[in-house]
Image (tube, helix red, strand yellow):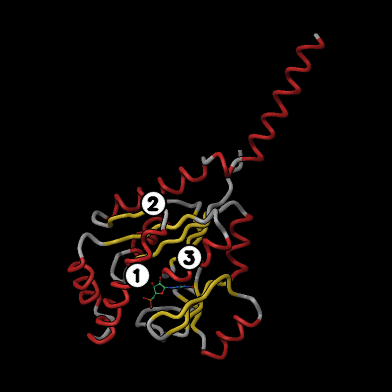
Amino acid sequence: MKKKGVLVILSGFAGSGKGTIIRELLQKYDNYALSVSATTRAPREGEEEGVHYFFKTEDEFKDMIAKGELLEYANYVGNYYGTPRAYVKEKLAEGMNVILEIETEGALSIKREYPDAVLIFVMPPSVEEIHHRLKQRGTESDEVIAKRMKKAGLEISVVDRYDFLMINDVLAESVEMFNAIVASQQMAVSRNRDYIDDKKKEFEEYLSRQKEN
Ligand code: 5GP
């Protein structure tokens, strides 16, 4: 039985460790594809074009919106971020599980268009820990960190609309939890209608052959 790919959205506060979970997951399992977003944010040190993001000017980004090339987009702390549509469609069609690591507004707009999408929210064990991880990363100024903490305080109110919550304490456990959520989704009856219909047909044929004999 060929499993259908699941569209999985992982959101979480800056510093929640979601990027690390995804990196480990991709190393361990080969049935996941990570969507690379477009953004108008400047690259951080070590970030590569096409690997971490497709870095765009605001005009280029707006052009992508106008051409319908983005599945969703949002403004986060002053910069645009969006998911290129073509890659997601292509990988899902190949049967891969596609991961979008995006913020809450984009996540909820995807859920409206694709009710089958699975929304996972990841949180660090405590609020203090969020601040600590952001400071430790050392990639943002105190001012940007303060803005991101404020944003986190707002984002907590939409967690209610997600499907799953993960507390990222022990990394290896988080990776397994993520994979378990997705694997269980693939077994959902609602995602396997075609397979079930096929089996019903097979049974009908089998029983009618029995009758004939
Ligand atoms: P960062 O600047 O830390 O890389 O990302 C800031 C926020 O933007 C994170 O919450 C990240 O998940 C989110 N983000 C990254 N790509 C996208 C995207 O394509 N669409 C949306 N809506 N959010 C994104």
Q: Name the residue under label 3.
A: 108
Q: Quadrant of the C terminus?
A: top right
Say if disc 3 is inside 8 Å of ligand 1: no
The image shows residue 78 at horizontal and vertical percentages of 40, 86
Q: Residue 169 carries which label?
A: none
Under mark 3, the amino acid is Leu
Task: State which tag comes first along the sequence, 1 or 2.
Answer: 1
Q: Which residue is drawn at 73% across and 17% down?
A: 207
- SS class, disc 3: helix
Q: Residue at x 56, y 91 (%)?
A: 59
Q: Residues within 10 Å of mark 3 (few under 14, many from 20)?
A: some
Badge 3 or badge 1: first in the primary sequence? 3
Percent x, y of residue 16? 29, 65
In the image, which disc is placed on residue 155? 1
Disc 3 or 2, which lies upstream in sequence?
A: 3
Q: Give neighbour class at mark 2: few <14, some 14-19, many 20+ (Cα, 10 Å).
A: many
Query: What residue is at 58 percent from the left and 63 percent from the top?
Result: 113
Quadrant in the rendering for residue 87:
bottom right
> Mark 2 sits on what residue?
178
Mark 1–mark 2 Cα distance, whole angstroms, equals: 21 Å
Taking depth in this image into account, of 1 and 146 the one nearest to the observer is 146
